[in-house]
Image (cartoon, rainbow, N blue to C red):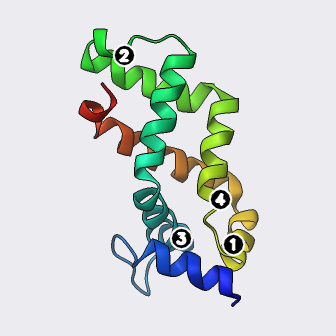
Amino acid sequence: MNTKDNYILALRGDTLGNVSDDSRPEERFQNQTLRPILKVQNELFLAVFKNYLVKQKIEFHTITPEKKMLVIDKAIQRDMKFRNILKGMIIGFFTLEEFETYTQNSSNLNKRMMNLLIERLKSQLQLLD
């Protein structure tokens, strides 16, 4: 493992969630890689989403919590440019080995990434106003 990979792993910290010998590879990747990255990048994700709201002229503070959740879903699921920016922010924190794992199952892991990010943003609605 190279120095950059060691630095990335040290920055991200420990696994979040349960990982056992019985865990499926996608679940292991989610808990060992994706969740720690999302935690480290949380403030940046919030800032990027707030910027997205401004650029799209969405007055987030004036809509109901239910509509806010729909805005989050639509932004991440339907706006491919925005979605790709978010994926890049996550992939940029992969080690080389993790990137190899990701490329072997990117479709399923992309779904997991985006679902985790959607839930993270939804759980922090008060910080987005």
Q: Which amino acid does label 4 sit on?
A: Ile
Q: Look at the image and tell me whether residue 119 can be seen.
A: yes
Given contact means CB atoms under 8 Å apart, are the residues at marks 2 and 3 in contact? Answer: no
In what quadrant of the picture does the C terminus appear?
top left
Task: Report the residue at 71% width, 69% height from top.
Answer: 99
Given contact means CB atoms under 8 Å apart, are the residues at marks 1 and 2 in contact? Answer: no
Dividing the picture into quadrants, the one containing residue 78 is: top right
Q: Mark 1 points at which residue?
A: 101
Of circles 1 and 2, the one toward us is 2
Given contact means CB atoms under 8 Å apart, are the residues at marks 1 and 3 in contact? Answer: yes
Give the vertical position of 10 relative to 118 (above or below): below
Who comes first in sequence, dot 2 or dot 4? 2
Q: Which mark is residue 87?
A: none
Q: Which amino acid does label 3 sit on?
A: Phe
Q: Position of residue 87 (x, y in %)?
A: 63, 48
Of circles 1 and 4, the one toward us is 4
Q: Mark 2 points at which residue?
A: 60
Is disc 3 placed on a helix, strand or loop?
A: helix
Looking at the image, the residue that sits furthest to the bottom is 1
Residue 56 in the figure: left or right of residue 81: left
Is disc 2 placed on a helix, strand or loop?
A: helix
Q: Look at the image and tell me whether residue 63 can be seen.
A: no
Q: Mark 3 points at which residue?
A: 29
Give the vertical position of 125 relative to 25 (above or below): above
Q: Which mark is residue 91?
A: 4
In what quadrant of the picture does the N terminus appear?
bottom right
Q: What residue type is labelled 1?
A: Thr
Q: Where is residue 82 in the image (x, y as percent from the top left)?
A: 63, 32
Who comes first in sequence, dot 1 or dot 4? 4
Packing grade of label 4 (10 A; few <14, some 14-19, many >=20) is: some
Distance CA(mark 1)–CA(mark 3): 8 Å
